[in-house]
Image: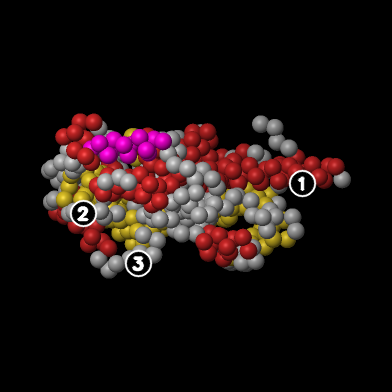
Amino acid sequence: MTVSSSISSAKINIAGGGIAGLIAAIELARAGAKVALFEQAAELGGRARTRKVDGFFLNQGPHALYIRGAFLRELKRLGIPVSGQKTRPTEPQVIWQGGLHRLPDSLASLVTGSFFSLPDRLDFARSQKALADGATAGQSFEQWLDSQAFSPPVRATMEGIARVASYANAPAVVDAKATLEQMQRGVAGVLYLDGGWSSLVDGLRDAAVGAGVEIRTGAAVGRIAVEGLRTRVVLADGGEHAADATLLAMGPKEAAALAPNVQSLAAWAGEAIPARANALDLALERMPEGAKEFALGLDVPIYFSLHSKAARLAPGAGAVVHIARYMAPDEAVRPDAMEELEAVADLAMPGWRKLEKKRQTLRGITVAHGVVRWDSARPGVVLPDAPGVFIAGDWVGEEGMISDASAASAVQAARAIVAMLERRGASRSAA
């Protein structure tokens, strides 16, 4: 790789050590820049961190790597190892009116299943063609569903698939085109990862260190100063680090708090609608006899899945099960949030309580910092009113959702920073 002098002499600060920050750090360091990454937590990874306890690996709620998504694409391009399997649940279920029914995942189950009536079966086949055809921009997912006039069970099925693919429970808010594209990625398949998502974080960290990135954990950034063509990171402990560019790889509210004078960040922080969830992650001695492997709520925004069938997440015959409720934008965390998820476990795998070894409870966690809205575009990686400051994350850019958006915007931001530095270098040479 040929490195220009304008890049090799550049110093870049990155605030945030999650997926976006790590990918951008690798990209910039491999381009020749001197990169310093600051993460306020003691560990890298953000919500991609995995808790290991007694041989069980517990992600922070259900995580899936989309086979046709930007994150896996960038991991492969960067040479980050990925170990996991595509999910193939046996007889997947839907939850409808308090009971379990076979989810139509094949022509045979569509014909023989108990959930759909004959007219519904025909309507479901029509819905799958509509999904493949996609949608035009400028309408919400709810508006698209209204235009399709599906039967109530089929409409509920499409809403359930949209929730599990996007992690968002906001059909009146999310963009139809982006949602259907995400549903198509989900249908194409996902991977559950051996050792949990920390295996990816470890691979990204090792690649960053190998490229020369200086990584500082436990280093909270207090504010960002924009000083002409240069920027300065001021840490909470008073330390200061000047740079030619700074990347904010974090949520919009966190970014706006660090740079309160940047009006574009304040505006995006005010408009962002996060996707949130309650999650119950269970480590079991084994799965109970007759337990289901997957259940998707249709009239309730619920998800249940045995992740350890596809990935190495448990010792011996142990099992790791993730249960989640996708929360509406203004939904409060109810006092009985975990009891609701335990009831789903009772329905899908009776007898699990006496087999429980460990659990992890997460209430109202932020799954994505900003859903893709139909009525406004997501911000780009370049801040129009703060030269030298860039952004990346699951709420930034035009490609994908959740971790795919993080990865895609990280690469785009890194390349925008390189392009800016090259322009500055060219200007100095001309002068």
Q: Position of residue 160 (x, y in %)?
A: 31, 48
Assess disc 2: are there few (<14), some (14-19) or many (≥20) residues with their C-alpha within 10 Å of its C-alpha.
many
Q: Residue at x 44, y 42 (%)?
A: 135
**Please, what is the three-letter code of the amino acid marked with disc 1?**
Arg
Tell me residue 169's x, y (percent): 36, 55
Magenta segment's dominant SS is: helix
Q: Which residue is mark 3?
A: 332
Q: Nearer the viewer, mark 3 or mark 1?
A: 3
Q: CA distance from mark 3 to mark 2?
A: 20 Å
Q: Nearer the viewer, residue 245 or 382?
A: 382
**Residue identified by numbered label 1:** 424
Magenta stretch: includes residue 413: no
Marks 3 and 1, how far apart at CA: 48 Å
In the image, which residues are magenta?
A: 121-133
Q: In this orientation, does residue 326 appear?
A: yes
Which of pointers 3 and 2 lies earlier in the amino acid sequence?
3
> Marks 2/1: CA distance?
57 Å
Q: Is residue 102 left or right of residue 83?
A: left
Given residues 87 and 153, the one toward you in this image is: 153
**Residue that numbered label 2 is attached to:** 344
